[in-house]
Amino acid sequence: MSDLPIEHRSEPPAMGERRARWGLGYQDKVATARILEILKDEFRTGASVFEGVRLADLEAARVDDFVLVWNTEVQGNSIKWRGDAAPVNWGELIGADGLLKELAEGYSRLSNKWSGKKIRVRLQSNRPPSTERHHAQLIGTFSVADFLRDRWKIGPTDQDHAELEAAWSKIAEHVGLKNGDFNDFIKNCEIVLGFPEPPVASPDSEDVRHYRKQFDDLHKAIATWLTDHPDSESIDRPFLLAAIGVRAYRSGLVQHFPPPQIPYQKNGTSADQLKRLIDSTAGGYLAVSGPAGVGKSTLVQDVLSDYPFFVPYYAYLPDGEGNPRDRGESLTFFQDVIGRLDKFLSDRYSLGIVDIPQGRAALRQHMAKAKELFEGWKGTVHSAEPGSPGLHQRRSQVSNRDVRKEAGGR
């Protein structure tokens, strides 16, 4: 980055960064990919704790490329890119102008600003960690690659041998933190090296095409937002979701029967019997039969609502409960079903369902994955000796239950 003009030298370092903030660079693409990843995880878990992103945060020191904000934590990010992708060595990490010192400074600045939140920092680069090890390095007993892979997440411990203890002492001396402060910094500092430029190449599919469109739409929307709000710092979650065309709320789909005119009493005996049948059935079908209006659908929904792969029964609701046309609308159905399956099969790249072709493709993808899991489970079970201790355990890990209500009065 070129020097700032003389009249701006007294400004915070990130001010110049904000003026030319959003382009086609590695750091901007990393930010876009990270935001999509966070939103996807929230959709899978049903959480809504991510609040937004701050770009070129003036108070984040050298972790100011972008700052991610949740309701209970904040993460500052330092993104480094180099065309030749030369390996990162110890001199660059803990030398005179080492990257770890910059991370520690950002960690301290964010801790002072966000006193009520957990603070994390992250270094990410396309450059891989160096695998070289020789005595002339600042830390000669470990390569950067070995140390980051084997020791960084563990941090310093009382059981460290002399060489490892010396390495941690060298790092602590460089970053300028001691004892508990140093341990807290290491615990909350993530280093990701050798990461290619997003979006990462992957085989072409409907899902991947939708992801790349979401990536491009979000990247462009943030650039537009920065142009329209040059003096603002934070982009909130609703804007980010709207940029990729995903709703932040569930549809108004009515999936449970309304209370009947005649008081309904739950049948505890039938519910317990159905639960026992489900738990004792390794595969196939279960049928719940009986006269029309006796409560079969309600019983099935009540019992199965706690089972992970249960998709609610879409039955006819009388007396105007919900618009029948809306209830039969296929996009809403796909959004609901795929949203549920995404919680357990996380292979999809894209976020949510925005149209019917994507819904069909996503359902096929989930069914193919379910088939793969089932065939793997079946092969494992068949290869086990009858009566072996692990057989029941394997059955319970991947089940092939398909509980279906087949009776009159649907």
Image (cartoon, helix red, strand yellow):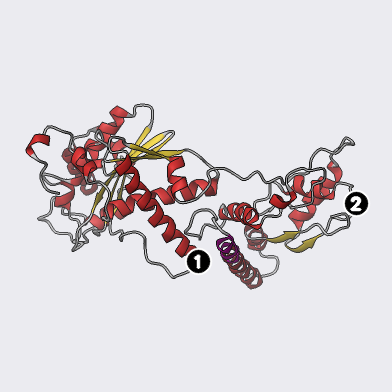
The numbered dot on residue 206 is 1
Q: Nearer the viewer, residue 212 or 145?
A: 212
Identify which amino acid the numbered label 2 is placed on.
Ala
Residue 330 pos. (x, y %): 65, 57
Task: Tell me the chief SS of the magenta region.
Answer: helix
Q: Residue at x 43, y 51 (%)?
A: 37
Residue 107 pos. (x, y %): 27, 36
Q: Is residue 396 left or right of residue 207?
A: right
Residue 394 pos. (x, y %): 63, 61
Q: Is residue 359 visible?
A: yes
Whichever of callouts 2 and 1 sits on the residue coming sooner in the sequence is 1
Name the residue tied to disc 2: 292
For mark 2, does the 10 Å Cα neighbourhood hold few (<14), some (14 to 19), or many (20 or more) residues?
few
Vertical position of residue 141 compared to residue 184: above or below? below
Q: Quadrant of the C terminus?
A: bottom right
Residue 29: in magenta span = no
Quarter assignment of residue 18: top left
Q: Residue at x 76, y 44 (%)?
A: 302
Query: What is the C-alpha distance between the residues marked 2 and 1?
Result: 42 Å
Identify which amino acid the numbered label 1 is placed on.
Glu
Q: Is residue 262 left or right of residue 198?
A: right
The numbered dot on residue 378 is none
Q: Nearer the viewer, residue 132 or 210?
A: 210
Q: Is residue 388 left or right of residue 265?
A: left
Task: Identify the magenta region.
Answer: 356-364
Mark 2 or 1: the one toward you: 1
Q: Is residue 159 visible?
A: no
Which SS class for mark 1?
helix
**Residue at the right extreme?**
291
Which SS class for mark 2?
loop
Residue 306 pos. (x, y %): 68, 46
**Residue at the front extreme?**
228
